[in-house]
Amino acid sequence: MGAPPHSKVRQDIRELNPRVIEARREFHQHPELSWEEHDTQVRILRRLSAIPGLEDVRPIARTGATALVRGNGEPCVVWRADIDALPVPEKSGLPFASQNPGVMHACGHDAHIAIALGIAELLAADPSALPGSVRFVFQPAEESCGGAEACIADGVLDVPHVARALGLHISADLAIGSVNVAPGPFFAAPTTFTLELSGLGGHAAAPHQAVDSVVVAAHLVTALQTVVSRSIAPMETVVLTVGKLEAGYRGNVIAESATLSGTIRTYTDAMRDLTIRRVEEIAAGVCAAFGASFTLAHDTTCPPLVNDDHVTSIVRAEAEAFFGAGHVVAAPSMGAEDMSVFLEARPGCYFWLGARNEAREIAGRHHDAAFAIDEDALALGVEFGARVIEANLRDLAQS
């Protein structure tokens, strides 16, 4: 399997790493939800202001932050890190567990903050060695979506003009010392939907006098399973899940109404539109069969994340050189990630960095109360992130 991950990290990053780990633990202890990252913002700005060589350190997007490493050249790339946490009561047992009851960094955004701070400190130590500049964006509200748009609206891609967008997501599913990166669609667009069913209430002993919305809902949930299996081409990728069904209030009363809520995940607008159309058509048919009616509401909160082919080839080459070709995989996800908004605005690449270590019994799941990562991944993230940035700046300078 090659050398252990820590042996790949150069000496200056090993010296920096204790501060990166300390930062990750500080932010892990003080998680905040989307658009509530006020204390997180203060802590990030304080740390950025303490790094010599950083310019344009300031708040953005209500609860976010930005800074600039101005290098020796015209090209500029953005490195984006999300900063919000989740409404999950922590059960990790870590000595630096959340001090905010009911809120936890259960998706690794604390690690994203720490890695970005580490990269910023590393590059700011010798900005003249960079063939361009790096805009660091600490983005709020990824989990709720909306934070990326707010950052871009505040001009983070404009001065200096950003040519490419880069970033990483820590992975509790991928072994430490590994990277998952692929060109093209890499994360799906999330579409939430709600079906409100209206029947006719009545006494449970007289069902012939009612239109039972529970029966309608049951048939509809079953019928919706055919959307992916019978309406979507086999080579396309779509997920449709009904995750919530609410109906009734007593066992001897036929429910007048029912509500189905779920999610659709797609890589293209065409597949999203087709899936929504089929949901509506099937709902219309099922409701007509039982004498019920319905309304459908849906919302797509961010676009699919699409990695640029050329930029991804640079990232993959750097990954193979740093981690070894056997430690680089290409496995797109049906999860959602609003880094997609940056990648709609600028070509770029977003990738997974492995932080799972079963030998150390670090094998949690994302969004889980026991989520955990191997902190050796932090130094790898700083080193590899800096390499990705430098490689893209060199490529831009030569083009």
Image: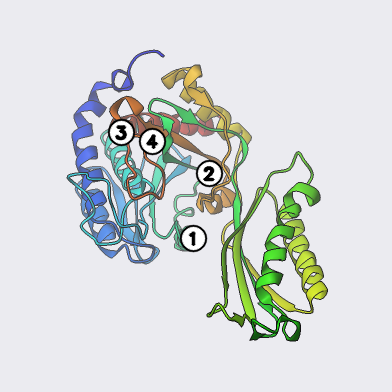
Residue depicted at 32% across the width and 43% down the height: 111
Circles 2 and 4, Cβ within 8 Å, touching? The answer is no
Indicate the quadrant containing the C terminus: top left, top right, bottom left or bottom right: top right
Residue 191 visible within the image: no
Q: CA distance from mark 3 to mark 4?
A: 35 Å
Residue at the image position 69 percent from the left and 77 percent from the top: 212
**Tag 4 secondary structure:** loop
Q: Position of residue 63 (x, y in %)?
A: 34, 63
Which residue is tagged 1?
145
Circles 2, 3 touching at the beta carbon (< 8 Å) = no
The residue beneath circle 4 is 72
Q: Residues within 10 Å of mark 3 (few under 14, many from 20)?
A: some
Q: Amino acid at mark 3?
A: Asp
Assign a secondary structure to mark 1.
loop
Specify the amino acid type for callout 1. Cys
Above or below, 236 against 137 in this view is above
Which is closer to the viewer, label 2 or label 4?
A: 2
Of residues 306 and 170, the one nearer the viewer is 170
Q: Give the distance between the C-alpha atoms of the residues marked 2 and 3, in whole angstroms.
A: 33 Å
- Taking depth in this image into account, of 244 and 64 the one nearest to the observer is 244
Q: Please name the residue that numbered disc 3 is placed on.
A: 374
Residue annotated with mark 2: 163
Q: In which quadrant of the rendered view does residue 289 lie?
A: bottom right
